[in-house]
Image (spheres, rainbow, N blue to C red):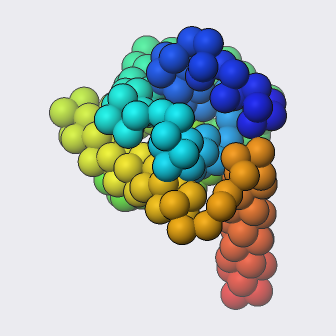
Amino acid sequence: MGTETIIEFISSYGYWIIFLFLFFGIVGIPAPEESLLFLIGVLIGNHKLAFGLSAFSAEMGVLLGMLAAYWIGKNAGKPFLRKYGKYIGITEDRWKKAEKSYLNDHRLMIFAGFYMPGIRQISPYFAGITKVPFHRYFLYSLAGSLCWVVPIIGAGYFAGDLFHINPKYVPYLGVLLLAIFLIYMLFKYVKNKAK
């Protein structure tokens, strides 16, 4: 989806579209969340959006997406894994190892997972499946989402203020960030294999 289309959606439907894009991006429907947040910042800098309403809509979309994914994981995750896990290589032993590893690092995965595409979509389901206490999950999700949403919107705002950034090129930022993340993960994988 092009930037012009996103801008048209925001113009037509208001801040609800920001909420919906981010909600569904977190729940797992592919969406370039970083690019969208950065674009929101650029549009705020160009006086096309209000900062308060944009940040609130984005934060609510992310946080409620995290809570919905946690609820789905808690209520449907284990039965789903038991029924379909074997088709994607998730055996009982592998699941127990993954569960133990996640529970050891769940605070970091929930809080810092926002900065890792893929992890931020999987982590809430894992938290629900492994029954991380809701109050703890909520606090880490709230803190992590605020520390992810506000700085990226702020970066878009300040970058758009310092340089003339054409909003139609902003999605390429998401592609660049994804490429850097994939290269880093590949490097880490190769390094671990070498050991």
- Is residue 86 shown above or below 38? above
Viewer-side residue, 143 vs 51: 51
Q: Quadrant of residue 124?
A: top left
Total label count?
0
Q: Position of residue 75 (x, y in %)?
A: 43, 15
- Is residue 190 shown above or below 81? below
Q: Quadrant of residue 159?
A: bottom right
The residue furthest left is: 135
Residue at the (77%, 52%) spot, across then down: 169
Q: Position of residue 122 (x, y in %)?
A: 56, 39
Q: Quadrant of the N terminus?
A: top right
Residue at the (69%, 73%) spot, across then down: 184
Q: Position of residue 3 (x, y in %)?
A: 74, 36
Viewer-side residue, 174 vs 87: 174
- Is residue 89 shown above or below 163? above
Is any atom of residue 79 visible in this view? no
Q: Is residue 98 left or right of residue 136?
A: right
Residue at the (36%, 29%) spot, across then down: 53
Is any atom of residue 180 visible in this view? yes
Q: Position of residue 100 (x, y in %)?
A: 43, 51
Viewer-side residue, 173 vs 75: 173
Q: Is residue 49 left or right of residue 193?
A: left
Q: Is residue 144 left or right of residue 12?
A: left
Residue at the (53%, 55%) spot, across then down: 156
Q: Quadrant of the C terminus?
A: bottom right
Viewer-side residue, 132 vs 66: 66
